[in-house]
Image (tube, coloured by chain):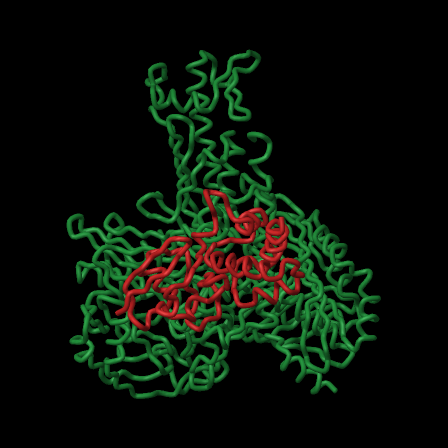
Amino acid sequence: MPDGNTGIGAAVKRKEDGRFLTGKGRFTDDINRPNQTFAYFLRSSVAHANIKNVDTSAALTAEGVVAVYTNGDMEGVGGVPCGWGLTFQNGDPMVEPVHPILAAGKVRHVGDPIAVVIAETKKQAKAAAALIKIDLEDLPAVVNMTNAVEGGTLVHEEAANNICYDWAIGDKDEVDKVFDGADHVTSIEIINNRLIPNAIEPRVAIGDYDAVSQKYTLYTSTQSPHVIRLLMGAFVLQIPEHKLRVVAPDVGGGFGSKTFHYAEEAMVTWAAGHLGRPVKWTAERSESFVSDAHGRDHVTTAELALSKDGKFLALREKTYANMGAYLSTFGPAIATYLHSTLLAGVYTTPLIYSNIIAVFTNTVAVDAYRGAGRPEATYILERLVDRAARELGIDQVEIRRKNFIPPDAFPYQTPVALEYDSGDYEATLASALEGADVDGFEARKSKAAKNGKLRGVGYSTYVEACGAAPSAVAGALGARAGLYESANVRVHPTGSVTVFTGSHSHGQGHETAFAQLVSEQIGVDIDSVEIAHGDTDQVQFGMGTYASRSLAVGGSAIVKALDKIIDKSKKIAAHIMEAAESDIEFEDGTFKVAGTDKSMGFGEVALAAYVPHNYPLDVLEPGLEESAFYDPANFTYPAGCHICEVEIDPTTGVVEIVNFTAADDPGIVINPIIVEGQIHGGVAQGIGQALLEGCVYDDNGQLITGTYMDYTMPRADDLPSYVVSTESSRCTHNPLGVKGVGEVGTIGATPAVINAIVDALSELGVTDMPMPATPQTVWRAIQEAS
Amino acid sequence: MATVSLTVNGKVMSAEASADTLLVNFIRENLGMTGTHVGCDTSQCGACVVMVNGDSVKSCTMLAVQAEGTEVTTVEGLASNGDLHPMQQAFHDNHALQCGYCTPGMLISSIDLVTKNPNATEAEIRHGLEGNLCRCTGYHNIVKAVQAGAAEMKG
């Protein structure tokens, strides 16, 4: 690597920081198009109602109004498609109701768009929307999943008992048999609280149409521009790819919620074509709360069968997964493909049965939020393990060690479809135990007790499946798209490099980490490498960034393309230096003829490729540019151990995290600064779920937590500093040995926090703690126990 | 409509604004300076924090007409002659930003905080930044950066 400090493993400060630090970032709302109009969506204020009439006449004549559209105006426009198809246990397809761009006949959740007003200014659009008269016939709202599946009111007529699918994995009879004969069974009921992703940049979409080229452009704050182009172009608006450009410039955080195709994107694009003018929509935060897909929201009953010495024999669970009112892009996959398949965790549990019932309710659609299914699975497992240890009187660390998949057991086939390629769970456990000074815990607990405080320590040892995915496996499990990634490496005549990647960076630092890869592979300085992403007209193709896949899948595609560059460069160098290709060695950016002092720099080879005066034109094309698509052989399996220490004031129920230790194995680390930052952020969101964040609907389907005044986002003074370390076991099936790090925090942290609270309160007889463990919830648990 | 004149980052600027135009929208839309961001509609997120006459202010809580005659500093005005402000440099050095959306407000709040309390403790920094939401960093590196920036600003 050049200068020994910009390649793989180097703590390079981020290249992208400069523009963000100086106010020169280019977010979607910073973009304005000539002759632009503004859209405002009139949304349902009730959860469930028949639309009797919508009178837009007054709005249409209001000052500045250009157009008002309702569903009836959008003939030929398709619904928002779902990207994943599941089946019932009997093989019947899941129920997949149409998700119209604007409500058709019925509104199904607070925030469901009924009409859109397009005007010269934002203010005019909003004012005119207030003039639309809507005649609604209220229907009872379906909010609670347990009630929903009993039938009665239906969110969609075609979904009997509001069930989208009833799916299962594992051999129930075999599992039940083990439970019947087990020494001990530990049971738990869990509500995995609904969360609202809340990227700080609200979603924005600008539709533009050029009548001369008959081409549409959508600027949108998305994590996956090519996926949006495919879904919106092919399924909603019937615009072929070559006439549709999707641009995702700087995007202010996503956490999954900006992966999906949203109705507003299609609406502004369609309207731009109709009006021949650009149409811009910027979500207000209160709109984000009722239109961005939410996360989690599972209700689970789970049991673990154990031998009396604490060996796990079998696990079974039944989960009700809230889909919301419509199926979002990946909605059906979260509780199944990403949840049930992870229930082995880091343990050798030989038999697992998981039954998932997906339920429609009159709430916002639920889809992937950082971790997506894997936090839910890990939470079930780690709460069960914690409780089992307490019931059997086994030490928390000991019970985990006793059931770990040992380092020499890889590749390890779990009973729930996945084959883990590598891991060393003891290594991260040992690192976390040291970082958390667990040996000193009892002394700290005694000291706290003298001050009237209760101290507890909680553990979580987890694995995750990320880097989604092998396309064949994803397809077999219901994906309607491939999950590969693509890269194009363009070496310019003087040796600088532009990489076009289908991954999308919205905080992950790809412009730095991917440049480090290039620097490592071909020896150019990272300042000579540009990473281009987020524009379907620039980048050949891409599946976007989610599921911690950018480095493992997108980075591997870059490496594959670089290998082709190196192969071609060797041929060029061999010709020019009059040597056999097999004698050319490439090291530190220089091509050498083995055993001689002849050499050529990478830049010289690049120039020769573009000025081919002395060039093997009979066998090679000029130029130096290569593309690659990479479809991984397997998921990657990051793992780790999180340990949380809390101190609780029993008189107020206030929980303080006094120590949080994360030891994670993300595989090979490209940039330790970025990796640590990802862990910090994920842990904060994991703690947020445990202590602060909870989306609440009332019985009428009104969102109670619809602003930042009501939904508790983690703030600086809610959180501690973290003790973070990494161990690296190499991924065996991708060229970089990387696994991923984006979601480890939300997966590992949440159960560690709740287990710590249960530990602190166990002496009072508390055995369970719902999330979020607010002071009121903790105080009540203490009162009820005593 | 009224003409609002104010000094932004050392330059006198003026533009027409309606009486209900918020300062943040005036800066972004009327003056075309998009470094200052909007992240909410309840004055909670702090992405829009700017300096007004030396105090950090959520610019969504102030009307443009109220800013008449004031001295405003936005994120675009922190660096001078191409040199980053010590707090900007500290954010870069400590990887205190990821997506960059909260960064403008976070920088201004941090500068105000340590200007008024140069020896702020970690707890004081965390308390002082509770009006600025960041969803990416978990605040760990922001706190480190503010400490580093404070040390540098003390010189």
Q: How many marks?
A: 0
Q: Which chain is the one coloured red?
A: B
Q: Is residue A111 above or below residue A251?
A: below
Q: Residue sitting at 49 percent across and 39 percent down?
A: A515
Q: Which chain is the one coloured green?
A: A
Q: Residue sitting at 54 percent across and 47 percent down?
A: B89
Quadrant in the rendering for residue A173: bottom right
Q: Give residue A361's position: percent from left, percent from top.
A: 42, 78
The quadrant the C terminus of chain A occupies is bottom right
Q: Nearer the viewer, residue A63 or B12?
A: B12
Q: Is residue A73 left or right of residue B112?
A: left
Q: Give residue B102's position: percent from left, percent from top.
A: 48, 59
Q: Nearer the viewer, residue B70 or A381?
A: B70
Q: Residue sitting at 26 percent across and 58 percent down?
A: A207
Q: Is residue A524 above or below residue A98?
A: above
The quadrant the N terminus of chain A occupies is top right
Q: Give residue A520's position: percent from left, percent from top.
A: 54, 33
Q: Is residue A528 visible?
A: yes
Q: Give residue A784's position: percent from left, percent from top.
A: 69, 87
Q: Is residue A228 above or below residue A739?
A: below
Q: Is residue A93 visible?
A: no
Q: Residue sitting at 75 percent across and 57 percent down?
A: A433
Q: Nearer the viewer, residue A290 or A636?
A: A290
Taking the view exactly as shown, the residue that stands out farthest to the front is B69
Q: Is residue A403 left or right of residue A545?
A: right
